[in-house]
Image (spheres, rainbow, N blue to C red):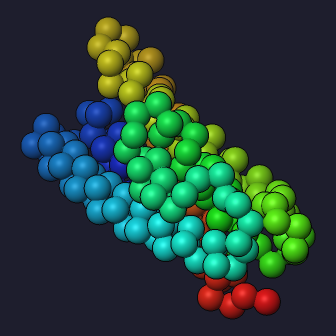
């Protein structure tokens, strides 16, 4: 849903909608993004807590960083990805057992691809919002940002579904 409204927001910036519709889409996007963010942070906090039970090896960040990592400036560029990667590695039934360490496990590169797409969207959206002179450049940035948003959404759905399946059916 967030992705669909975000794409409508980009279309609105291209002039496909009147200003009143664009404003409504913007506010809707902001609201849905806030709710989605809260739901995801709650899921991540629960998944991080479960991961510690499944694999008591030392995680790089405590469970509180599953939420704070998104909010605290500077560390928000890498802490969420670290938390998700540790949850992935701890929850993956193919992990090496009994080592006391969280080794990388098969498929963990999905987390890197998701994070790259997410950061690409965030950076290009921020740059595009600050450009005012060359509307073609802004449109190009917004288009690439929208593609990155779709990629990030698909990847985070895949990641969260797999982690949830591993945690609800541990082997």
User: Residue at 39% across / 27% down in the picture?
Assistant: 126
Q: Residue furthest top?
A: 133
Name the residue nearer the viewer: 33 or 4.
Answer: 33
Against 51, residue 89 (above or below) is: above
User: Residue at 48% across / 53% down in the picture?
Assistant: 65
Name the residue nearer the viewer: 151 or 97.
Answer: 97
The answer to whether residue 41 is visible is yes
Image coords of residue 52 (percent x, y): 63, 72
Q: Split into 4 quadrants, where in the image is the C terminus? A: bottom right
User: Residue at 18% across / 49% down in the picture?
Assistant: 27
User: Residue at 32% across / 55% down in the picture?
Assistant: 33
Q: Residue furthest left?
A: 20
Image coords of residue 136 (percent x, y): 42, 18
Against 16, residue 64 (above or below) is: below
Which picture quadrant has residue 40?
A: bottom left
Name the residue nearer the viewer: 164 or 17.
Answer: 164
Image coords of residue 26 (percent x, y): 22, 45
């Amino acid at each position: 849903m967030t992705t669909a409204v975000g794409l409508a927001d980009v279309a609105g910036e291209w002039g496909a909608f009147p200003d009143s519709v664009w404003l409504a889409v913007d506010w809707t996007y902001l609201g849905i993004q806030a709710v989605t963010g809260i739901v995801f942070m709650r899921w991540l906090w629960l998944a991080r807590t479960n991961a510690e039970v499944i694999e008591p090896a030392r995680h790089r960040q405590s469970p509180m960083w599953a939420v704070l990592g998104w909010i605290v400036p500077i560390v928000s560029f890498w802490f969420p990805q670290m938390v998700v990667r540790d949850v992935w590695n701890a929850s993956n039934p193919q992990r090496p057992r009994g080592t006391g360490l969280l080794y990388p496990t098969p498929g963990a590169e999905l987390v890197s691809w998701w994070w790259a797409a997410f950061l690409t969207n965030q950076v290009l959206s921020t740059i595009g919002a600050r450009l005012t002179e060359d509307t073609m450049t802004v449109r190009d940035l917004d288009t690439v940002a929208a593609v990155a948003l779709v990629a990030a959404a698909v990847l985070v759905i895949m990641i969260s579904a797999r982690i949830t399946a591993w945690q609800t059916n541990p082997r």
